[in-house]
Amino acid sequence: MENASWIRAMFEEGERLKDLYGPESLFDFTLGNPIEEPPQELKKELHDMVARQTPGMHRYMSNSGYGDVREQIAGFHRENSLLPFTGDHIIMTVGSAGGINVVMKALLDPGDEVLVMSPFFVEFMFYIGNHGGVMKLVETKEDFHLDMKAIEEAITEKTRAILINSPNNPTGAVYHEDELKELASLLARKKQEGHRIFLISDEAYRKLTYADTPLPDVFNLYDDAVAVYSHSKDLGLAGERIGYIAVSPCIADERPLIDAMIFANRILGFINAPALMQRLVGKFQKNSVDVSGYRRKRDAIYNILIESGFDVRPPAGTFYIFPKSPIEDDIEFIRVLQQHHILAVPGVGFGRRGYFRLAYCTEMGVIERSRSAFMEVGKLYR
Amino acid sequence: MEDRVILSNKIKKLVMDQEGWTRKMFEAGIRMKKDYGAENVYDFSLGNPEIEPPLSLKARLIELLEDPAPGMHRYMPNNGYEQVREEVAAYLSGRCGLPFTALHVFMTVGCAGGLNILFKAMLNRGDEVVLPSPFFWEFKNYIENFGAIPKIVDTKEDFQLDVGRIEAAITAKTRAILINSPNNPTGVVYSEESLKELADLLSRERRKGREIYIVADEAYRKLVYSEAPLPDLFGLYDLVITVTSHSKDLALAGERIGYVAISPHIADTPLLVSGLMIAIRALGFVNAPALFQRAVGSFQGSSVSIDDYRQKRDFLYDTLMEAGFECVKPTGAFYMFPRSPLPDEIEFVFKMQEEERILVVPGRGFGRKGYFRIAYCVPMETIVKARAGFLRAGKRYIGR
């Protein structure tokens, strides 16, 4: 609760400052609540679906979701991975947050350990702790990429799974195929030694990458893989809570695992993913909000930070950037930013002191107008 | 380590517990529909109402989507849109005569989501929740999800609350009593008298320093057949939290929309709301689906037609009586819970399947052996066509 309340605390301070100075003169980079609208054709289809009023369209369906929607999504994964995904390997969920909870409930017994790469999205701590699991943090390297040695050292007899999140919140890092292959071979080695470790991949930002090469597909790298997706970011549907779990067809005994997840979806109170949104997203698996808009914003904020003298890496995905704080005390630095009307979240909120996170899923104008404020703050530490 | 199973031991046990007869029944049902055609199998096993939302609600949805407001699909505060919460609060204030505000309303992913976040926020490991039986089996899972313990207490012969038994079940660890009226699976509406008795008991406990909450699942609140409306718990006792969904009253089960309502008499409401905010995030719900929040705000006073359900209830109840079954006449919801003519109700349920192609659920699925549940939220035609089967079963097993 302590950690997670940072974002909220910042948000509330922001509200206070907005009242004080007016929202126009405030640069709010705290929340990952994308302002991008869903694609126009999706909005139209949503309207048309409701207007068609198909009988039964708002009723319960199977707890795993509509069969035809799951089949559509399986088709997307078949194409991506060339693996024999069927609708049975897909479970529709209440966003990826719901999906990860379902996966954890199915996998974890009290005391089981889950490795999480730090810096990390703090909610992971809850998702694991909810079901009696223990989160074991593993620091990433200086460039926020996987530190294989640290991962290997963190594995104990109780390690049940490793949870990765690429493209990453808060750093914007996208893991390369090479490092994922290295991770996969480490896990494969452990499996040969008789220790089965699941790879859980949170791919909520999957479609928000800026590189030309597509995101490596975890299903092609390691058999015991489960990936969790959401359409909050790629289709701009964050508030509608729609996502899904994809279970690798290469898992040797996948059926009981899938059944347990469907069961967990029920008893955790989700029951099923929202009906109307399931039908909608099934048709838009290949679509995404306009990434080029985010790329322009990334370039703008990155250039402003560099110009202002910050130590920062250009993010390869998501809409977050994670610069180094000029002073060790990131909380103190956040206060300095606030004095210049910039709202950001301290790195400690993601398990990494001495950094801060900016969410640039805002209007371009906010980024542009924030330039002089960042320049002024930069000057203070020259 | 090689024999480490794919599932956690905890979930494996839960899955196995339910496997046995539910799976067998479910599969038999599917097989039958295939063999005889779905229209020749009378499926009374599911509480999935085969009705449509009110036309005005559909119109409201279209209106929302015809002119989509920018940002209408984004995140909003974790407890939901303020305007929607205000609409719900106004409805509650009007209904109960208490000063509900938007703070007292917390939008949730259906009733099931509401109960889970509430228990996550309220319960410590080892805390006890009194649960009158028969009960909706998932309640047990919702309580156990957070390491708390359901204390199952039988109701009376007529399925009304047995406050004496409840009193006997209360311990220092009792944190709440979870009631569900109109009740799934019995269709019984708890009488005002019994609720007053419960409130008196809890008030006495409170004076002894025990703060026990009434958590009321009111998913079926608007499905009541009697003239008298459902007694209002908020007026009977201070520590009341209700959890509601629009699955049944607005026929939106698949859309997962409901809310938690906190009594204005509860002093610690801001703290409880903060706890719920954390819980709804931690459990991964994050917020209730955005579009349907906006849709239901102005439909608080509405409901699907109760008259259709009443007709179905009357026809089915008369059929059961004529066949000789013993059954408490339901005054709410869309369930009936007759006594099984065979001591082992699972045997009877399978007989009904095999001999009459009638699908019902054994009472032990609701914590009460020797009974079975009929969900009559099906087309009237199904009930009419199943009549002969019930009558024959009556002759065969009850001996008329």
Image: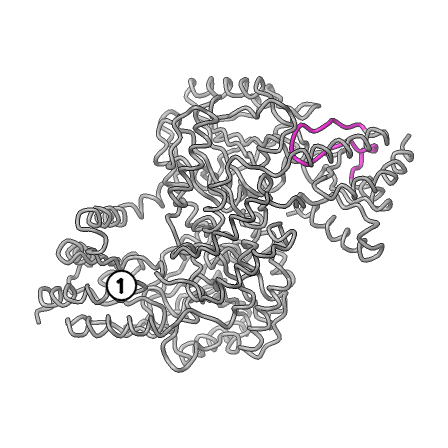
Q: Is residue B364 left or right of residue A317?
A: left
Q: Is residue A226 above or below residue B361?
A: above
Label 1 element class:
strand
Kind of residue sitting beneath label 1: Ile
Q: Can you identify the residue that label 1 sits on? A: B374
Magenta segment includes B48: no
Q: Is residue A258 left or right of residue B344?
A: right
Q: Position of residue A177 (x, y in %)?
A: 57, 20
- Is residue B162 visible in the rendered structure shown here? no
Magenta region: which residues?
A311-330
- Mark 1 — on which chain does it sit? B
Q: Is residue A336 left or right of residue A207?
A: right
Which residue is depicted at the point 54% across and 53% down?
A: B289
Main secondary structure of the magenta stretch? loop
Q: Is residue A332 above or below residue B159?
A: above
Q: Position of residue B317 (x, y in %)?
A: 24, 72
Picture quarter with the C terminus of chain A: top right
Q: Is residue A282 above or below residue B48?
A: above
- Is residue A234 visible in the rendered structure shown here? yes
Q: Is disc 1 surrounded by few (<14), some (14 to 19) or many (20+) residues within 10 Å?
A: many
Which residue is depicted at the point 47% across and 75% down?
A: B199
Q: Quadrant of residue A356?
A: top right
Which residue is depicted at the point 30% across and 62% down?
A: B378
Q: Is residue B75 left or right of residue A200?
A: right
Name the residue nearer the viewer: A235 or B22.
A235
Q: Position of residue A181 (x, y in %)?
A: 53, 18
Which residue is depicted at the point 33% across and 69% down?
A: B187
Q: Position of residue A191 (x, y in %)?
A: 43, 21
Magenta segment includes A326: yes
